[in-house]
Amino acid sequence: PPPPPPPPPPGARRRRGGGGGEASARVLALAEVAGAPVYLVHLTCREALEAVRSARVRGVRAFAETCPQYLYLSDDKLALPDFEGAKFVCSPPLRDNSHAPALWQGLCLGDLQVVATDHCPFNFKGQKEAGRGDFRKIPNGLPGIETRLTLVHQGVVEGRLSINRFVDVVATAPAKMFGLHPRKGVLAPGADADVVIWDPQKRVDLSAARLHMRVDYSLYEGQVFTGGPAKVFVGGRLTVDGDRFLGKAGGGRFLRRRAFVDP
């Protein structure tokens, strides 16, 4: 059999931002023709953001999200030695560092409504490293569910977002988009009393050894950010107190979603 393809060269870019913009524009055009709302996931580049912004100006019910990895990381991570770059392989891929400022601005101005995660907790050992010698076998995806709030709050610390906008993109707008509002995403009588008591001064080390996700590495190893949860209440019950988890397995319940509400 022919030998496997070599590993990608340093800084390899399998898909460029222009392609993401063109694909987004096509989806938005189809939504406009159909008169249907559309939600674009995992926006990574300014070209796609501009397509969303243009569609919204035309009256299309267009909504979009980005993820923290596209706000903080760039494709130079793929060139790390000793196959460390495999930890940063995801779909859609990381872009060069010229795109992140546009995404932050999109969040600030409301062109992007949600910050999600695309959480895929592939381990480096036994999973990501399966692509040694053939990069096509690297599972695409990054861990991120535990680090999302702290990373977005860092945007508040750095003056990129207001505190109200922070709450909107991580809680209120997602609840509306996914048909869970007003049970979720709001502090009001009749809501589910899911509450995060946030410490805006808390110093949070996002190294793997300090996290609770079931994955053997962190995208932000050795980095310390500002802002983290002090307490978490689920349905009015204290579930997280500091670093202690007090919840019990089986405590969740089925929630029937409604049609989404424009955030």
Image (tube, grey):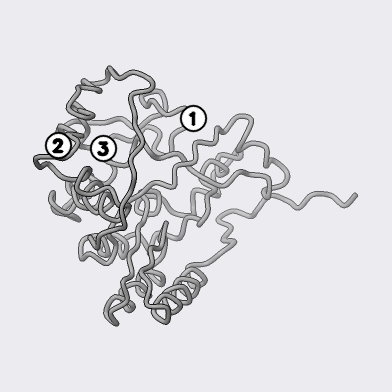
Whether pointer 1 and pointer 2 mark residues with C-beta atoms closer than 8 Å, the reply is no
Q: Is residue 153 left or right of residue 66?
A: left
Q: Nearer the viewer, residue 15 or 110?
A: 110
| x 42%, y 78%: residue | 34
Q: How many marks?
A: 3
Which of the two residues, 219 or 254, is positioned nearer the viewer here?
Answer: 254
Please name whichever residue, 225 or 182, is drawn nearer the observer in this view of the structure.
Answer: 182
Mark 1 to mark 2: distance in Å?
26 Å
Q: Earlier in the sequence, mark 1 or mark 3?
A: 1
Q: Sequence-wise, which precedes: disc 1 or disc 2?
A: 2
Asked whether disc 2 touches disc 3, contact meaning CB atoms under 8 Å apart, the reply is no
* Residue position marked by numbered label 1 in the rendering: 215
Question: Gap between marks 1 and 3, in whole Å?
Answer: 20 Å
Image quarter (top left, top right, bottom left or bottom right) of the C terminus: bottom left
The residue mark sitting in front, 1 or 3, is 1
| Crowd band around label 2 with a 10 angstrom C-alpha radius: few (<14), some (14–19), many (20+) | some
Residue 54 on image: x %, y %: 32, 79
Q: Which amino acid type is shown beneath numbered disc 1?
A: Val
**Does 126 sit left or right of 84 as displayed?**
right
User: Residue at (23%, 49%) from the top-left corner?
Assistant: 181
Amino acid marked by disc 3? Phe
Q: Nearer the viewer, mark 2 or mark 3?
A: 2
**Residue 140 location in percent, x, y?**
57, 47
Residue tagged 2: 200
The residue shown at (47%, 55%) is: 94
Residue named by callout 3: 225
Mark 3: secondary structure: strand
Q: Amino acid at mark 2?
A: Pro
- For the point 67% across and 48% down, the residue is 135
**Outermost residue, right side:** 1
